Amino acid sequence: MRVLAIGDIHGCPHLLDDLLGWVAPAPDDLVVTLGDYVDRGPDSRGVLDRLIARKRAGMKLVCLRGNHEVMMLAARDGGRDDKKMWLSVGGVQTLGSYGTSPGKSGTLADIPREHWDFLDYNLLDYYETDRHIFVHAGVYRDVAMDEQPDSILYWEFLPDNMQHQSGKVVICGHTSQKSGDPKVVPGAVCIDTFAHGGGWLTCLEAETGKFWQVNLIGKRREGIVDDE
C-alpha cells in the first residue's frame, strides 16, 4: 500500500485528472489531499466534483482542510468583510466556476448543497500515519497534534525547521514554491508547487520520497526528495 499526498490544487481539475491518471492509485493505496481545492484557478467547482466522485467511487481518499476552504465557509457564514476578503484571494474565480450561463458568474447561492456538505463535514484538520503527519500549512514542534491551533494548521508559512516532537515527518502545502520544486526543511516536506500559477501539481509517495508532477501545458516529471 502506498500513501500518496497531493498538494494544493487551487481550481485546476484537469491537473488532478492528469496526475491521478499517471500515478494510478491502486485500490489499497491511500490518497491524502492537503487542502486548498478552491480559489485562484479557473474551475473550483470541477475540483470539488472530482473529489466527491472519487470518494463515492470507493477511492481511499482523505481530504484535509486548507485556509481557502476556511475563507469560503466564512464568506458564506460571516459578514461583508469575510466575503470581501475571500473574493480578493480567489473567491471571484471560484464563483465564476458556478456560473449558471456562459459569461455569467455564480453566487454563493448557486453552490450546490453537495459541495457545502463536503466542505462542512468531509474535511479533516490533519491526518497521521505511523511515520508522517499530513497538514495543510504546518505544526508547532512542541505541541501535541490534538492541541495544535487553527492558526498553524491553516495559515502560517513554512519555517526553517518543523521537527515535531512525535518524530514524524510533516508533509504540508500552503507555502507556494514558485520554483516548482518540493521544499525540504528539517522535519517537513512542502509540496505546494504553485500549480495554478504556472508551476506543477505534485503527488508525493510519503514512504519513499518519490514524487510525480504535472503542469498546465501537459508536461510531466518525477523525482525523489530526501526528508531525512
Image (cartoon, helix red, strand yellow):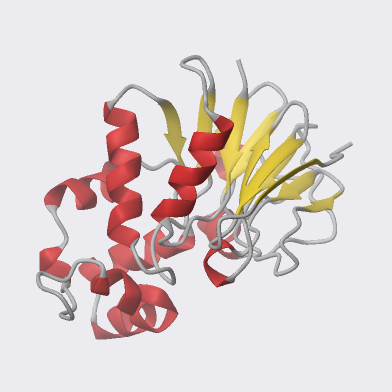
Observer able to see residue 169: yes
Q: Residue at x 44, y 78 (%)?
A: 89
Observer able to see residue 141: no
The x and y percentages for residue 214 are 60, 51
Q: Is residue 210 above or below residue 106?
A: above
Picture quarter with the C terminus: top right
The x and y percentages for residue 38 are 38, 61
Residue 111 sits in quarter: bottom left
Nearer to us in this view, 74 or 216: 216
Q: Is residue 192 above or below residue 147?
A: below
Q: Residue at x 33, y 22 (%)?
A: 58
Q: Residue at x 29, y 62 (%)?
A: 73
Picture quarter with the N terminus: top right
Q: Is 167 placed left or right of 16 in the picture?
A: right
Q: Is 17 placed left or right of 34 in the picture?
A: left
Nearer to us in this view, 58 or 170: 58
Residue 158 sits in quarter: bottom right
Q: Is 132 placed left or right of 88 in the picture?
A: right
The x and y percentages for residue 90 are 40, 75
Q: How many numbered marks have been drawn onto this rendered protein structure?
A: 0
Q: Residue at x 56, y 36 (%)?
A: 22
The x and y percentages for residue 44 are 34, 61
Nearer to us in this view, 9 or 71: 9
